[in-house]
């Protein structure tokens, strides 16, 4: 029966045919949404508040920053060109408000919320600071740092310290930083800048209750043409009542942020916990005999869940990639009562080298229906 | 100011560090979920009801089929080795029920619903037929095709015609098929087999109200190590009340299926429409002047939406990849009343070369809040 | 024996661990070489002679064009900002030679050969023309097109017609083009511009013996962060004696180019044939009985080989991806004498819709050693 | 001028259109060649000498192993099913020579050199040993380990110790291993098995002058559908006079192997050095003033080069991915005489945690032409 031999090569993997039109669409117009849940009654806005253009030492026209933000799933950005540093001024006369003005119509077209901002740039120490929610950048061009801070403050700016430890030989929290902090000029700090997470800065942010900021500080074109869970730009997740300037400012002032960097989420326990709870789904329970439970654990968000067991039942390690599911077989004391699995999510950082402790509750057999109900979907 | 120059190379794209443990997890244990919505009160089960093992002319051990199904996001499978064709019988003595028996414990471990099945294999014409929901395959090993059909039928099997046109020189719907159809043996038909969609078979399925089946008929190991929207195995989406044998059978008998093949969804309009409605989200409305509306259209499922305008406002073509969003700027008669956009989804096939007509409703400015509410999320 | 069961999950696929340092290297500094052979005693230079910056209507600083070219494996580029069109002039005062001057030090650093150029921009018709190998762009800013052409010509420029048919309602070869051609101003033509290959222009290029040009005409940042065979920017392959301005000009003036676009190579038969001969390797001959030969055919370049049989032995179609090998089993008249396989390479275009005819020679059994020798490696 | 605005979106990245036929070719028939140079007058054969099928505790039919090897660029394989362990024997009666016999015609068809082999399987310790180049596996089925060794030895087998430390609680080189070694039964050892590289075993291999083996020990279908430099199966590179059984055996007996695992090459310095010399190309020299040299360093093979400077000029770290090039700017004592850069290739392991020391010679300005000549290409 020759036919059966011919069928042996039947393949099942199918590649979607990619036409030019698709490519055009995909690259010119399509935004890739990031899957991160809204939490605690807030919208989770994806933000990048630190970036440059040809108007200071960047290499792109301001509209490029909007296009990149749209493609990569951001909701809110601020262009923060240096006020005091203009290496292209021979060709581009300095105009401090132009990056914002040029980018604004494109931001409106794309539905990106654009915030007027600037980088107050001093030799390190004291270093660089971003001020956003400005009405006019010009008054910030002052000789004295404190004058610039006051000018920004008068406009109601939210100000934070950029890449505090970027000069290894001149790092550290100095008196000037204490002064800026006590005068309530400086209300946030970059725990992540570009590719760098700084554990010492992380500790300062916790100790001083500064808002956690994670910024790209991007100068060149974004090297990522599409955001994927494996490859995304660092961003600040802002938990805001709505997507408006006022609501974003309220969230920043009140410290409602989490930083997403590589496979790390960095922030306060209450926000990381809320994200974890919405990301995870425990389902498909299968009870066997008196002491065996099988179930599936799904990760419904774009950040991997990397968990280490702290005690009790469960596998030593649980790693669930974005959109993935693992299946467990558990030996429990009794299938009739709920079982609690104790883990630490090692890539959800509540402090330097300190993961988020979580409990996964596997419902007992008699309570299954209720258990599933509360998982929701 | 040297520092700024040093900062110029700040990069933003970050690749997650992939450790061996992740790779092990990813490949050995992790299932990639497929994003396709539940519809009309039913669960959308991802199914493949046609596959082979070393027990007929396949090249893998039965447990491999379960592992593949788990990894690629399937919920239900049936192994359907040929009853009459055993090229490996010199090494593997024929045992018609063994593939099911060997795979069952692994299916239980993985949470995959496994259905006992077999392929009734005759020279073409009349060709090959799958029977599933069997209790014992042995009684189907008969000389006469009709006897095999009756034996399957007695066990309550659901039976369909496989790859009807796979032999170009011996294709066509013949008297024998009419007989099988009229005797209610044959209740489904493979619109898709492996890489092949057959438009003529699609027309027969509609004309005779046969259940749409899309099967891999896989013989070799699955070449896809992870399901992605761009690269997935063909599957039959079954709309079932729950994930049980009875519910799947009920759905198949009553024709509640859609076939997913490449970037095509093939099925009855009511199911395609329900999927479309749940996949699409229209949001972020921005009204400008009296006649301009901007909004975003998101595709929340793993099938691309490829739409052509049939009349009225809107861009000529709208292509939204899985998880992607496009932004529209519309000139409308008035921003105050709702605007309807008329498109045909060319990759949602309700018939051969016939896409699904859809209407996208953009709410008027005064009705925004209500409009958004009904989109839900 | 429990151990064996534990071994069952041994995996073999290994993902290289990607550290941040690698990513930094990979994106900031690493160039991906393109595998295309040197031919006929010439070096095969990968070139893009048409691109824009913020100094006309592009969106990047000139150095970005050099960095992109380096990363994507180009050897030679020309920045060709519009002479007459400056939408950013409110912010960037017009300076026609600045893009070249700014990019030059970066080009020297990267080892990219940079050619001073400009785009002479007129309403269509007559349209746009690039002039490169200029000493000074300023004299080309004239009211009359012919004056600009003459100014360019005086500087020894090589001039070609850009995207001739880009305005569908104003397309066609007109008297003005004949004049430019006959005056030997216009010596090349864009068969490919950005995503578009134009078959009519291809025919003109052949008829008029114009140099084949394939340019990106890129305005925004390059969306491709690494060149791969599946995803590369369109380029002009220039067959030059060496990597110098003089040698590139000599090649352009004498029509020694081939355009690489998507999976197409477009050019004169002698160049396509020379590339094909160096790309293909026929080896691993296995003779069986009197009439069966098996052998492997490898594609050693970064362009796929897609061949259709024209007559005689061999499979109907042969598709060999970059760096891939297919294996053939041939029934031949006699294994003792050479066998010729006749194919057309359908993606090596010697004319509109016209592939390159090739002959693959399989040596006879007695002549194997000699045959292999001549294949070289 | 509206046209220029329309051109702004011109894109340059082009995705090759992937048709079904390509996919079919790509997956069913195409082999991806691995770029690793022939060295020292030998052919570099890519080999995997340890794998399983349904005939012991694997899950695939023997032909699958040949198909996988072909796709992933291997030249030589051996199927080594356990002699003493047959979990499928209820369904597949034991036949020790069948895996080889079934796979042989497919190997001939694909041009893969297949070696008859088997795994001599004892409780650990002493553990498992592979014997290949057998004429008949049956005589190796003995009660005593030494009898099996002698039976294999009589047939001229090459024998090595598999995954020596795979049982953490029963690991170590014991008297029995010394006996096998001294009797010259055991002439190789698995430095790499599956995903695991073992530094202690590496030390033993050096100390005892055992042949370095790197095997997959694969049981399930290969999870990699195409070999890429980032994702490849572990393999043993064998430096053989030709692709014949005799030549492979000669190379194994004489220790002419290197193991490729993840991004590591593990082996004797002379072989790693020869590979490095052929992989690297230093070119495109640019001399500036009296003390500055720029040049490009290309990696022409499929293994990344990861180098750390040991002393003198050059960047602290040099990482060159497969097919990539980096560009250096060096401050040297004088551009007129050659400059030597001293590095250690940290991923070319000549011992546990010990990279290969290399010298990169940058020719002086007057000697450039000669220098380039000797680099060859």
Image: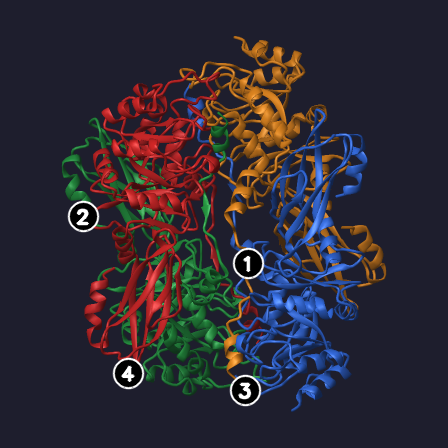
Chain colours: A blue, B orange, C green, D red
Q: Which residue is mark 1?
A: A24
* SS at badge 4: loop
10 Å crowding of disc 2: few (<14), some (14-19), many (20+): few
How far from the left and from the top, in percent, is residue C366? 14, 36
Q: Is residue A98 left or right of residue D141?
A: right
How far from the left and from the top, in percent, is residue C154? 33, 84
Spatial CA distance of label 3 from label 4 is: 33 Å
Spatial CA distance of label 3 from label 2 is: 60 Å
Spatial CA distance of label 2 from label 1 is: 44 Å
Q: Which residue is mark 3?
A: A89
Spatial CA distance of label 4 from label 1 is: 49 Å
The image quadrant that residue D27 belongs to is top left
Q: Which residue is mark 2?
A: C374
Spatial CA distance of label 4 from label 2 is: 46 Å
Spatial CA distance of label 1 from label 3 is: 35 Å
How far from the left and from the top, in percent, is residue D54? 44, 25
Say if labels 3 and 2 share a chain.
Answer: no
Q: Chain of mark 2?
A: C
The relative height of residue B15 versus residue B224 in the rendered view (above or below) is below
- Asked whether the residues under the numbered discs 1 and 3 touch, taking CB atoms below 8 Å apart as contact, a structural biologist would say no
Q: Is residue B377 left or right of residue A77?
A: right
The relative height of residue D228 versus residue B47 in the rendered view (above or below) is below
Q: Which residue is mark 4?
A: D290
């Amino acid at each position: 029966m020759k036919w059966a031999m011919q069928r042996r090569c039947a393949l099942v993997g199918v590649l979607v045919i990619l036409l030019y039109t698709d490519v055009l669409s995909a690259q010119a117009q399509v935004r890739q949404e990031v899957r991160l849940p809204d939490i605690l009654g807030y919208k989770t806005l994806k933000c990048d508040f630190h970036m440059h253009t040809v108007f200071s030492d960047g290499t792109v026209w301001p509209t490029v920053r909007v296009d990149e933000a749209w493609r990569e799933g951001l909701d809110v950005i601020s262009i923060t060109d240096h006020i005091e540093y203009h290496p292209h001024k021979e060709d581009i006369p300095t105009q401090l408000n132009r990056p914002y003005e040029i980018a604004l119509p494109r931001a409106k077209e794309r539905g990106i919320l654009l915030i007027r901002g600037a980088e107050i740039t001093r030799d390190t120490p004291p270093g660089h600071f971003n001020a956003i929610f400005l009405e006019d950048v010009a008054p910030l061009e002052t000789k004295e740092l404190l004058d610039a801070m006051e000018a920004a403050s008068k406009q109601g700016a939210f100000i934070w310290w950029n890449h505090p430890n970027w000069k290894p030989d001149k790092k550290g929290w100095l008196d000037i930083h204490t002064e800026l902090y006590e005068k309530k000029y400086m209300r946030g700090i970059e725990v992540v800048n570009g590719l760098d997470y700084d554990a010492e800065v992380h500790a300062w942010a916790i100790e001083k209750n500064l808002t956690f900021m994670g910024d790209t500080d991007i100068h060149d074109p974004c090297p990522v043409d599409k955001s994927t869970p494996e490859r995304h730009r660092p961003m600040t997740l802002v938990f805001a009542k709505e997507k408006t300037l006022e609501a974003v400012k309220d969230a920043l002032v009140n410290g409602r942020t989490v930083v997403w960097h590589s496979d790390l989420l960095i922030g306060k326990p209450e926000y990381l916990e809320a994200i974890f709870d919405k990301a995870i789904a425990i389902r498909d329970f299968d009870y066997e005999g008196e002491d065996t439970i099988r179930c599936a654990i799904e990760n419904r968000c774009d950040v991997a869940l990397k968990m280490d067991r702290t005690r009790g039942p469960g596998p030593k390690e649980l790693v669930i990639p974005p959109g993935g599911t693992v299946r467990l077989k558990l030996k429990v004391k009794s299938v009739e009562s709920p079982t609690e699995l104790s883990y630490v999510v090692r890539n959800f950082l509540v402090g330097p080298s300190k993961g988020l402790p979580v409990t996964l509750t596997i419902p007992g057999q008699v309570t299954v229906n209720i258990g599933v109900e509360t998982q929701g979907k």
